Image: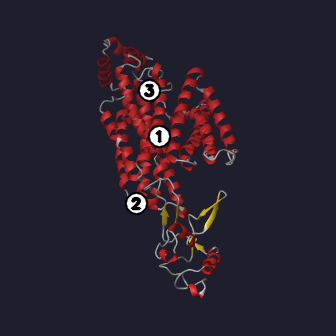
Amino acid sequence: MGYDAILQYLGDFGPFQRRTALLLLLGNFQTGMHIAVMTFIGAIPDHHCRVADTGLSAYNTTWPEALNFSIPMEEVDGTWRLSSCRRYSSEVISGNFTTTGCPGDSQHGNLTSACCESRWDYRNGNTTGCTDGWAYDRSQYHSSVVMQYNLVCERAWLRELAQSIFMAGVATGGFIFGVLSDSCGRHRTLLVCVLLLVTCGTGLAFTSNLAAFIALRFILGAAQNGLQFTTLVTGMETIGTSWRMAFGICSTLCPSVGYALLGILAYVIRDWWILQLAITSPGVLSLIAWWFIPESPRWLLLNNKVEEWRKTIQRIAKYNEIEVPAKMYEYVESSTSGSGSANASGTPGDSKRNYNLLDLVRTPNMRRITVTIIFASFNALCVYVGLLFGTSQLAGSHYVNFILGACVETVAILTAGVTMQRWGRKPPTVAFSLLAGVSCLATAAIPNDTWASAPPSWSPEWAASWLRSLVSLVTSGGPSL
């Protein structure tokens, strides 16, 4: 307990620790934006097959009405609308109909009602794919990755692949940067993560190749997760024990605030590449902040870098206006002498044996705990990520839905923090997990016409969708911690 003793002597949350905590949390805001930005830059707008728009004036009709001559209707969730992925095999081109299936007097010239009727009968059975590309509704999104790379219809799986590879990067980054922070130090790992976020985030905005876009998203996912974990560990090892839980809650809260900021930025910036640059720009501030963040004193001590450790402690003491006696240094160094780079309880001096990942499954009790935590985390993340990326499917404004979802998540995290402070970790985790599961099952049973008898000013779809998401987001906040 020697290391915790000197932290308490320096002040559990003194001026230096407060400044360091704020600088560390600055990076966590941008991680939330990078995680969720695909909900906007990868949103799927209304679209249909691109068709020729020439010769329409000859038929005395408007363009929306003329689409009926080229795009078939399809039923989606009980509503008839223009098909997103199919078009008629024959279409209006340059003011003339093709010769197949039209009366002779309408082969060349103005349309007659007889021609239109026969054409409808003919076209309903003869459709093809969007061989000439797609036309997109740009009223909500001026540009997006989906529009640039045509990730719709038979190419829609590429959009899902891009997001899946990003999540694979998140998993990979947690492992790689965890090992890197233990071997090379927290400070250097923070720098690598921030540099990758800035360079890859900027590169994404200017890439014109889908494969390069997916590859950069993979690296970005790894870097943002590495930054989150290294930030949390550095803060925990710099702040005293009485404030560590509060710092952990704040580090979880920062991405949620980042989500809200992302929603506001996305509302103002409707071009995907400009939005990507906007969420990457805070990385420059993180690079500046990095110079004022010290290496973890605990990491220095455990890796026998005694001189550097002393300089860091003296730096903290000077900033906090505290004088550390020489005996305190000797006590901490002697209590930590010979300890490994990581030990069982996470505090120096508890054991002389080195520990590694295999110790998580070495004994039956540790195997049970490890498997239970992994399963609970996997379950919570599946629900959380599904709800996070599902906001674009809700009725109403995508931007309002997303910002409200971020606000709900913020309340959920604060609630989880209060309950853990009062009842510990295990009871709230179990309670929130059960409540989340029951709520998700219950919301699936809510019909879309629940508010069918509501006043016209209400939106039944919006209300039903938000009842589902509101309950699920609130109850999934606890397990996500």
Q: Position of residue 115 (x, y in %)?
A: 60, 80
Q: Residues within 10 Å of mark 1 (few under 14, many from 20)?
A: many
For the residue labelled by badge 3, is the local secondary structure a helix, a strand or a loop?
Answer: helix
| Gap in angstroms between the C-alphas marked 3 and 1 | 24 Å
Tell me, for residue 183, which label it has, or none: none
The count of marks equals 3
Dot 2 amino acid type: Asn
Q: Is residue 426 left or right of residue 166?
A: right
Residue matched to label 1: 259
For the residue labelled by badge 2, is the local secondary structure a helix, a strand or a loop?
Answer: loop
The one nearer the camera, 450 or 255, is 450
**Farthest front residue in view:** 60
Which residue is rendered at x = 48% and y = 28% of the image?
Answer: 248
Residue matched to label 2: 209
* The C terminus sits in image quarter: top right
Q: Residues within 10 Å of mark 3 (few under 14, many from 20)?
A: some
| Gap in angstroms between the C-alphas marked 1 and 2 | 27 Å
CB-based contact (under 8 Å), mark 3 and mark 1: no
Tell me if residue 299 can be seen.
Answer: no
Check the image and report above or below for 442 versus 340: below
CB-based contact (under 8 Å), mark 3 and mark 2: no
Residue matched to label 3: 236
Of labels 3 and 2, earlier in sequence is 2
Which residue is rendered at x = 40% and y = 38% of the image?
Answer: 180
Q: Position of residue 477 (x, y in %)?
A: 57, 34
Q: Position of residue 366 (x, y in %)?
A: 59, 30
Q: Quadrant of residue 470?
A: top right
Check the image and report above or below for 203 versus 366: below
* The N terminus sits in image quarter: top left
